[in-house]
Image (spheres, rainbow, N blue to C red):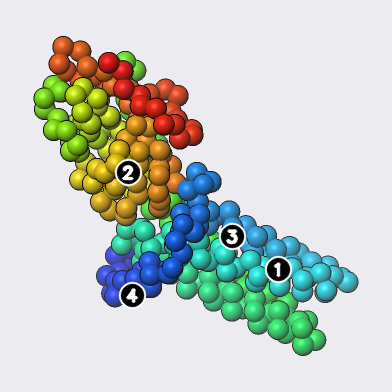
Amino acid sequence: MDRVEGAAALDGLVDRVRGAVRALPLGDGRDALHGRWLGHPLHPLLVQVPIGTWVSAAVLDLLPGQRRAAHALVGVGLAAVAPAAIAGWVDWAELQRRQMRVGLMHAAVNITAVGLYAGSFTARMRGRPVLGKALGFAGLLTVSVGGAIGGHLAYRQASGANHAEAVPQLVEPGWHPIGAVADFPVGEAVRRHVDDVPVLVVRESGEQVHVLAESCSHMGGPLSEGTVVDGCVRCPWHGSVFRLADGWNVRGPATAPQPVFDTRVTNGRVEARLATPAPEHPVETSRHAA
């Protein structure tokens, strides 16, 4: 996997496939496929159907008198592949390059598994159950390898993980000074630190100041280098949009909101503290405290 991560020779293919995926006319469906409504990526949930049905088919293939049921389960798994694959490709197109290289290998192995299961389904339909079972077991082995590569993506490379999750554990309770109000130009993103944790500071007007964790929850992008428009900040890496008032992820690919801080101004200086509990639903009111 380490060699695949460093395989720059794959980058030409990565760029072509990424361009094709990003060009798909999905509209708002793109965020739905990312799983923004769910709070985490949708792809791992969708893959449970084909994997579960194929494992069940393999068990039935070992039992007598279950030929028709096993055949049906192989077919259900094949039917469930498309939505799972589309969600996976949409997530893949918003990853970092080393992750995308591994993702191509993950996809290639899974495509091979789907081909084996398609052959298994066809063989069973044509009355060749022994060949159908053999191809099914080969497909199960192959899809298991694909799952292991997916595990590397998720747990070794942290694709799909919330990259801002650690912030509440790193910031001490209480108010923290972050600078004079005059140091923050109105409407501009500024990077500061709270307990060595980078934060995004945006002054809206007067003494109204918003503070969010600076590392984007999607892939850790620097929000202080993003664009501030209409009370939101857009990540410069993959375009996730977060509302300044409460950190809510207005648009993906981020599936988790940003940790947000309460703010107050004392003697012309801005102080911030981590808002607790973290917001679970979007709210329209500001967390600013004078």
The residue to which callout 1 is attached is 76
Q: Which amino acid does label 2 sit on?
A: Cys
Give the Cα separation between the discs numbered 3 and 2.
Answer: 26 Å
Element at badge 2?
A: loop
The residue to which callout 2 is attached is 216
* Nearest to N terminus: mark 1 or mark 2: 1
Give the Cα separation between the discs numbered 3 and 1.
Answer: 12 Å
Of discs 4 and 3, which sits in the foreground?
Answer: 4
Res 47 label: 3
Q: Whole-percent x and y of residue 39?
A: 50, 44
Asked whether the viewer can see residue 216, the reply is yes
Q: Whole-percent x and y of residue 252?
A: 40, 51
Give the Cα separation between the discs numbered 1 and 2.
Answer: 38 Å
Residue located at (44% from left, 61% from top): 27
Of discs 3 and 2, which sits in the foreground?
Answer: 2
The residue to which callout 4 is attached is 16
Viewer-nearest residue: 87 or 264:
264
Does residue 257 lie above or below 68 as drawn? Answer: above
Q: Do the residues labelled 2 and 4 touch (CB within 8 Å)?
A: no
